[in-house]
Image: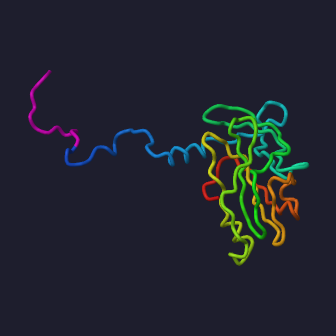
Amino acid sequence: MAFKYTGVKFDDPDLKVDQAGNKIVSIPLEVHRRAIQAVSNRVLGSTAGSGIVGPQFLFNLGAAGSAGLMGSMAVAVVRNGVWSTVAVQNNMFMPQGVQGTGTVAKYLVASEDGTSGTVKGPGNVITRTDYTTEALAAAAAKLPDLPDGAVALGYVTLVTDVKLTFNNAAGFAVGTGGTCGTGTFVNLICMPYDK
Protein backbone atom coordinates (compact mmCIF):
# COMPACT_ATOMS: atom_id res chain seq x y z
CA MET A 1 0.00 0.00 0.00
CA ALA A 2 1.53 3.24 -1.14
CA PHE A 3 1.05 6.47 0.65
CA LYS A 4 2.58 9.89 0.60
CA TYR A 5 4.43 10.79 3.76
CA THR A 6 5.92 14.23 4.11
CA GLY A 7 7.51 13.90 7.54
CA VAL A 8 10.61 12.03 8.76
CA LYS A 9 10.45 8.27 9.16
CA PHE A 10 11.97 6.71 12.27
CA ASP A 11 14.82 5.06 10.29
CA ASP A 12 15.77 7.97 8.03
CA PRO A 13 19.40 9.07 8.45
CA ASP A 14 19.92 12.31 10.30
CA LEU A 15 20.89 14.81 7.64
CA LYS A 16 22.84 16.85 10.19
CA VAL A 17 25.26 13.94 10.79
CA ASP A 18 27.94 13.06 8.22
CA GLN A 19 27.11 9.57 6.89
CA ALA A 20 30.44 9.13 5.06
CA GLY A 21 31.90 7.17 7.98
CA ASN A 22 29.24 4.46 7.53
CA LYS A 23 30.06 3.78 3.90
CA ILE A 24 32.34 0.95 2.78
CA VAL A 25 35.32 2.39 0.94
CA SER A 26 38.57 1.03 -0.39
CA ILE A 27 41.71 1.65 1.64
CA PRO A 28 42.75 5.14 0.56
CA LEU A 29 46.27 5.17 1.94
CA GLU A 30 49.15 3.11 0.55
CA VAL A 31 50.60 2.79 4.04
CA HIS A 32 47.46 1.01 5.28
CA ARG A 33 47.42 -1.36 2.33
CA ARG A 34 51.09 -2.22 2.86
CA ALA A 35 50.55 -2.75 6.61
CA ILE A 36 47.71 -5.21 5.97
CA GLN A 37 49.81 -6.95 3.34
CA ALA A 38 52.77 -7.23 5.74
CA VAL A 39 50.73 -9.35 8.17
CA SER A 40 48.62 -11.27 5.64
CA ASN A 41 51.60 -12.37 3.50
CA ARG A 42 53.09 -14.97 5.81
CA VAL A 43 55.02 -18.15 6.33
CA LEU A 44 52.64 -21.08 6.86
CA GLY A 45 55.14 -23.76 7.82
CA SER A 46 57.78 -26.11 6.56
CA THR A 47 57.34 -28.77 3.92
CA ALA A 48 60.30 -30.69 5.43
CA GLY A 49 60.85 -32.14 1.96
CA SER A 50 57.50 -33.95 1.99
CA GLY A 51 55.36 -31.35 0.24
CA ILE A 52 53.06 -31.42 3.28
CA VAL A 53 53.04 -28.49 5.64
CA GLY A 54 54.27 -29.63 9.04
CA PRO A 55 54.74 -28.10 12.49
CA GLN A 56 58.10 -26.46 11.66
CA PHE A 57 57.39 -22.80 10.84
CA LEU A 58 60.86 -21.37 10.35
CA PHE A 59 63.10 -20.62 7.37
CA ASN A 60 65.97 -21.37 9.78
CA LEU A 61 68.04 -18.34 8.87
CA GLY A 62 71.77 -18.42 9.65
CA ALA A 63 75.27 -17.83 8.32
CA ALA A 64 75.91 -19.26 4.86
CA GLY A 65 78.37 -21.97 3.99
CA SER A 66 80.68 -19.51 2.25
CA ALA A 67 79.04 -16.14 1.53
CA GLY A 68 76.09 -14.15 2.84
CA LEU A 69 73.16 -15.83 4.57
CA MET A 70 71.46 -19.21 4.42
CA GLY A 71 67.91 -20.45 4.95
CA SER A 72 68.19 -24.17 5.68
CA MET A 73 64.49 -25.11 5.80
CA ALA A 74 62.04 -24.91 2.86
CA VAL A 75 58.83 -23.20 3.95
CA ALA A 76 55.32 -22.84 2.58
CA VAL A 77 54.18 -19.22 2.27
CA VAL A 78 51.06 -17.30 1.32
CA ARG A 79 51.83 -14.30 -0.87
CA ASN A 80 48.87 -12.16 -1.98
CA GLY A 81 46.56 -15.10 -1.35
CA VAL A 82 48.61 -17.60 -3.38
CA TRP A 83 50.34 -20.57 -1.74
CA SER A 84 53.92 -21.39 -2.79
CA THR A 85 57.14 -22.89 -1.40
CA VAL A 86 60.36 -21.00 -0.69
CA ALA A 87 63.26 -23.38 -1.26
CA VAL A 88 66.33 -23.99 0.92
CA GLN A 89 68.97 -21.41 -0.01
CA ASN A 90 72.68 -21.11 0.65
CA ASN A 91 74.86 -18.08 -0.12
CA MET A 92 72.17 -15.38 -0.32
CA PHE A 93 74.31 -12.34 -0.99
CA MET A 94 74.03 -9.18 1.03
CA PRO A 95 73.21 -5.83 -0.63
CA GLN A 96 76.31 -4.12 -2.02
CA GLY A 97 78.01 -1.63 0.28
CA VAL A 98 80.11 -1.23 3.40
CA GLN A 99 78.88 -1.17 7.00
CA GLY A 100 81.29 0.96 9.03
CA THR A 101 83.24 0.08 12.16
CA GLY A 102 81.39 -0.14 15.47
CA THR A 103 77.89 -0.07 13.94
CA VAL A 104 74.65 -2.06 14.19
CA ALA A 105 72.19 -2.67 11.33
CA LYS A 106 69.30 -4.99 10.53
CA TYR A 107 68.95 -6.78 7.19
CA LEU A 108 65.65 -8.33 6.11
CA VAL A 109 65.34 -11.60 4.19
CA ALA A 110 62.13 -11.63 2.14
CA SER A 111 60.64 -13.60 -0.72
CA GLU A 112 59.35 -11.36 -3.48
CA ASP A 113 58.50 -14.18 -5.90
CA GLY A 114 57.30 -16.84 -3.44
CA THR A 115 60.10 -19.27 -4.36
CA SER A 116 63.37 -17.74 -3.13
CA GLY A 117 64.69 -15.28 -0.54
CA THR A 118 66.49 -11.98 -1.10
CA VAL A 119 68.43 -9.91 1.45
CA LYS A 120 67.23 -6.28 1.77
CA GLY A 121 68.59 -3.43 3.78
CA PRO A 122 69.89 -2.14 5.98
CA GLY A 123 66.96 -0.22 7.42
CA ASN A 124 69.28 2.23 9.18
CA VAL A 125 72.81 2.03 10.57
CA ILE A 126 73.36 2.84 14.26
CA THR A 127 76.70 3.80 15.80
CA ARG A 128 77.23 1.64 18.89
CA THR A 129 78.88 4.42 20.91
CA ASP A 130 75.71 6.54 20.64
CA TYR A 131 74.10 4.15 23.16
CA THR A 132 75.21 2.92 26.57
CA THR A 133 74.92 -0.76 25.59
CA GLU A 134 75.07 -2.80 22.42
CA ALA A 135 71.57 -4.11 23.16
CA LEU A 136 70.16 -0.55 23.12
CA ALA A 137 71.92 0.14 19.83
CA ALA A 138 70.47 -3.06 18.35
CA ALA A 139 66.99 -2.06 19.53
CA ALA A 140 67.39 1.32 17.79
CA ALA A 141 68.28 -0.36 14.48
CA LYS A 142 65.20 -0.80 12.29
CA LEU A 143 64.32 -3.20 9.50
CA PRO A 144 63.96 -1.90 5.95
CA ASP A 145 60.45 -1.73 4.51
CA LEU A 146 59.03 -5.00 3.26
CA PRO A 147 58.94 -4.89 -0.55
CA ASP A 148 55.46 -4.69 -2.05
CA GLY A 149 53.95 -8.17 -2.36
CA ALA A 150 56.78 -9.90 -0.46
CA VAL A 151 56.80 -12.30 2.50
CA ALA A 152 59.19 -11.66 5.42
CA LEU A 153 61.24 -14.81 6.18
CA GLY A 154 63.69 -13.50 8.79
CA TYR A 155 66.31 -10.91 9.61
CA VAL A 156 69.83 -10.59 10.92
CA THR A 157 71.08 -7.92 13.32
CA LEU A 158 74.67 -7.39 12.24
CA VAL A 159 77.15 -5.80 14.68
CA THR A 160 80.53 -4.81 13.25
CA ASP A 161 83.80 -4.86 15.16
CA VAL A 162 85.02 -1.53 16.58
CA LYS A 163 88.13 -1.75 14.35
CA LEU A 164 86.82 -3.61 11.28
CA THR A 165 84.32 -2.63 8.60
CA PHE A 166 81.99 -5.15 7.01
CA ASN A 167 82.26 -5.12 3.21
CA ASN A 168 79.08 -6.61 1.77
CA ALA A 169 80.76 -7.19 -1.59
CA ALA A 170 83.57 -9.29 -0.15
CA GLY A 171 81.58 -12.55 -0.04
CA PHE A 172 81.90 -13.34 3.68
CA ALA A 173 79.62 -15.67 5.63
CA VAL A 174 77.66 -13.02 7.51
CA GLY A 175 77.68 -12.89 11.31
CA THR A 176 80.55 -15.31 11.98
CA GLY A 177 82.83 -12.74 13.66
CA GLY A 178 85.82 -10.59 12.67
CA THR A 179 85.39 -8.94 9.27
CA CYS A 180 82.05 -10.80 8.95
CA GLY A 181 80.54 -9.00 11.95
CA THR A 182 78.58 -10.68 14.71
CA GLY A 183 75.06 -11.72 13.75
CA THR A 184 71.88 -12.44 15.64
CA PHE A 185 69.45 -14.35 13.41
CA VAL A 186 65.66 -14.15 13.82
CA ASN A 187 63.09 -16.18 11.87
CA LEU A 188 59.73 -14.58 11.05
CA ILE A 189 56.25 -15.75 10.08
CA CYS A 190 55.19 -12.21 9.06
CA MET A 191 56.65 -8.72 9.12
CA PRO A 192 57.02 -7.55 12.74
CA TYR A 193 55.21 -4.37 13.74
CA ASP A 194 57.91 -2.80 15.91
CA LYS A 195 61.26 -3.84 14.44
Q: Residue at x 69, y 75 (%)?
A: 131
Name, please, the residue furthest toward the right.
65
Above or below: residue 97 compared with residue 111? below
Viewer-side residue, 97 vs 82: 97
Q: Which residues are magenta?
A: 1-13
**Horizontal and vertical percent position of residue 128:** 73, 72
Query: Does residue 183 appear left or right of residue 138 in this picture?
Result: right
* Residue nearer the viewer, 137 or 8: 137
- Where residue 33 appears, as percent x and y from the top left, is 52, 44
Q: Residue at x 77, y 41 (%)?
A: 55
Quadrant for the N terminus in the image: top left
Q: Position of residue 161 (x, y in %)?
A: 83, 69
Residue visible at 68% across and 46% down?
A: 152
- Does the magenta run of residues contain 2? yes
Magenta stretch secondary structure, dominant: loop
In the picture, residue 114 is in which quadrant? top right
Residue 176 image offset from top left, x and y in percent: 88, 59
Judged from this view, the residue extending furthest toward the top is: 1
Q: Is residue 118 left or right of residue 31?
A: right
User: The C terminus is located in which quarter?
Assistant: bottom right
